[in-house]
Image: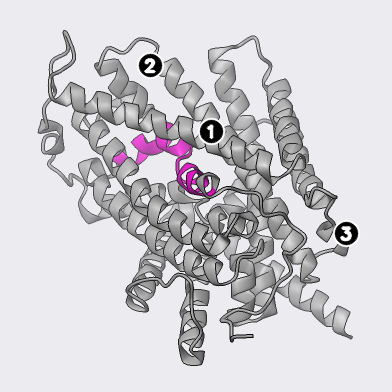
């Protein structure tokens, strides 16, 4: 058997029924969340038109991370993904820590997405009670994940299609508006890029502040590496998905933000809902309702994907004896049923607590895990740095090789170091960063102690 840059991990009991088209659309959809449709205006207000620089930096970072994960996933498709790669590169404690950290983040976010989607839906149809809708969403997507990966993949495929179609339609409307092609609507031109203080009215400080906002919009893209383990012909599928997805994500974000900045002054209060603001200028009826419903779809898509990702990660941890063995059980359809139920159980509990005590439970939990995706990306890049060098030294053939190694990996680590520095420099994000560090330390210590007890 040829040398491998990663050690074996058991994923053989999971199925391989995800189609390449589903993996590609999952990659696209995972980076297009409700934050783009509703929250991108925060970044614009922080930096003005120069928010495009923040998106370019964050987008470049995500492209490098996706390529690094793609290289490792093509070489070793496993449901543990970056957790397994961290274990191979830095030891079992590192692998268990990043796996548990990601799982904790996802199960908290699942609850936030259910409550958030229910709250948004209530603004359109107030007759639907928020508690009932939130719990119904949780039950529905639990059932989808229990029915098998093929059903999950098909739902994510169509969710992603809807989100991508919405963005393309938005960009097309924006171009028509700017070109003066819409009847009875004057073109605003491109003056908003330079008026109201210029392109970068708040300078580098504004670009940095916006970077802290926009980088989290790309969180979730790492799930493609997890899903690769259950995809047909994973070696080819993951490489194709990475090549297809990475640049399109950047184009979608830059295209959408360029339209927003051109049409709506960055000083406008209407940027609280930027997509709806543009459509209102274009005189599109029902714009606010349409954007709200798309945001609901985006949240539900993320809920579905995060439940899938959480269940596969804890399944992988169980397979490696880093979690209770029962979580590694699969049913005849190759679904890790106990892992799905365990992942959704915390989500149900957090959802109920948030509904009983609004704005008191989830904000605290989200603050603790808010920066964990950045740590996952950091450890993934470090793993790729170690494993790629190991593979090159051993002469291992890699199905997909990331271009620009090691310089692009080092560059991405530098960007992440800058972001961590910015998190520490801002009073409102410092606590979030320190909470993430404390949680990581607790998980690492617990994993190390549990391993010693097993081996004693």
Neighbor class of circle 2 (other Cα within 10 Å; few <14, some 14-19, many 20+) is: some
Q: Which mark is residue 326?
A: 3
Vertical placement of 2 versus 81: above or below?
Answer: below
In magenta stretch: residue 115? no
Q: Secondary structure at mark 3?
A: helix
Residue 90: % across, % down: 60, 81
Q: In this rendering, would 261 be left or right of 107?
A: left
- Please report the residue visible at 80 percent of the width from the left and 48 percent of the height from the top: 333
The image quadrant that residue 194 belongs to is top left
Q: Earlier in the sequence, mark 2 or mark 3?
A: 2
Q: Nearer the viewer, mark 2 or mark 3?
A: 3
Residue 336: % across, % down: 79, 52
- Front residue (pair 374, 396): 396
Q: Is residue 108 visible?
A: no
Q: Mark 2 — residue?
A: 287
In magenta stretch: residue 31? yes
Q: Earlier in the sequence, mark 3 or mark 1?
A: 1
Neighbor class of circle 1 (other Cα within 10 Å; few <14, some 14-19, many 20+) is: some
How far apart, in angstroms, are the residues tagged by discs 3 and 1?
32 Å
The dominant secondary structure in magenta is helix
Q: Please report the bounds of the magenta region as a residue range.
A: 23-44
- Front residue (pair 286, 364): 286
- Please report the residue visible at 44 percent of the width from the left and 19 percent of the height from the top: 290
Residue 9: % across, % down: 70, 72
* Disc 2 and disc 3 in contact, CB within 8 angstroms: no
Quarter occupied by the C terminus: bottom right
- Please report the residue visible at 38 percent of the width from the left and 26 percent of the height from the top: 273
Quarter occupied by the N terminus: bottom right
Q: In this rendering, would 214 be left or right of 1?
A: left
Q: Mark 1 — residue?
A: 158
């Amino acid at each position: 058997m040829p040398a491998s840059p990663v050690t074996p991990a058991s994923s053989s009991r999971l199925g391989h029924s995800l189609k390449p088209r589903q993996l590609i659309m999952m990659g696209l959809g995972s980076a297009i969340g409700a934050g783009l449709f509703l929250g991108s205006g925060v970044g614009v207000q922080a930096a003005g038109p120069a928010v495009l620089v923040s998106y370019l930096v964050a987008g470049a970072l995500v492209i490098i991370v996706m390529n690094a994960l793609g290289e490792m996933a093509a070489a070793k498709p496993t449901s543990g993904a970056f957790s397994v790669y961290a274990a191979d590169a830095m030891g079992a404690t590192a692998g268990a820590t990043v796996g548990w950290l990601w799982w904790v983040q996802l199960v908290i976010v699942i609850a936030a997405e259910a409550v958030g989607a229910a709250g948004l839906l209530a603004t359109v149809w107030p007759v639907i009670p928020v508690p009932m809708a939130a719990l119904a969403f949780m039950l529905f997507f639990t059932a989808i994940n229990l029915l098998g990966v093929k059903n999950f993949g098909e739902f994510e495929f169509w969710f992603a299609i809807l989100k991508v179609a919405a963005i393309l339609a938005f960009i097309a409307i924006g171009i028509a508006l700017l070109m003066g092609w819409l009847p009875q609507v004057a073109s605003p031109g491109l003056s908003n890029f330079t008026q109201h203080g210029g392109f970068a009215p708040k300078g580098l400080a504004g670009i940095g502040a916006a970077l802290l906002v926009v980088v989290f919009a790309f969180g979730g893209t790492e799930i493609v590496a997890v899903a690769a383990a259950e995809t047909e012909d994973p070696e080819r599928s993951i490489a194709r998905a990475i090549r297809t997805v990475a640049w399109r994500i950047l184009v979608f974000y830059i295209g959408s933000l360029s339209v927003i900045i051109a049409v709506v002054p960055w000083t406008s209060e209407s940027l609280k809902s930027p997509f709806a603001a543009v459509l209102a200028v274009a005189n599109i009826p029902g714009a606010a309702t349409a954007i709200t419903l798309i945001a609901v779809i985006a949240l539900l898509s993320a809920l579905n994907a995060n439940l899938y990702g959480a269940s596969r990660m804890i399944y992988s941890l169980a397979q490696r004896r880093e979690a209770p063995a029962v979580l590694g059980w699969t049913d005849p359809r190759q679904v890790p049923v106990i892992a799905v139920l365990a992942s959704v159980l915390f989500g149900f509990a957090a959802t109920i607590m948030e509904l009983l005590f609004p704005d008191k439970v989830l904000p605290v939990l989200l603050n603790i895990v808010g920066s964990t995706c950045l740590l996952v990306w950091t450890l993934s890049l470090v793993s790729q740095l170690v494993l790629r060098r190991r593979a090159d030294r051993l002469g291992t053939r890699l199905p997909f090789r990331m271009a620009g190694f090691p310089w692009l990996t080092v560059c991405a680590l530098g960007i992440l170091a800058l972001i961590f520095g910015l998190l520490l420099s801002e009073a409102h994000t410092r606590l979030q960063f320190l909470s993430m560090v404390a949680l990581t330390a607790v998980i690492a210590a617990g994993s190390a102690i549990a391993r010693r007890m097993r081996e004693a």
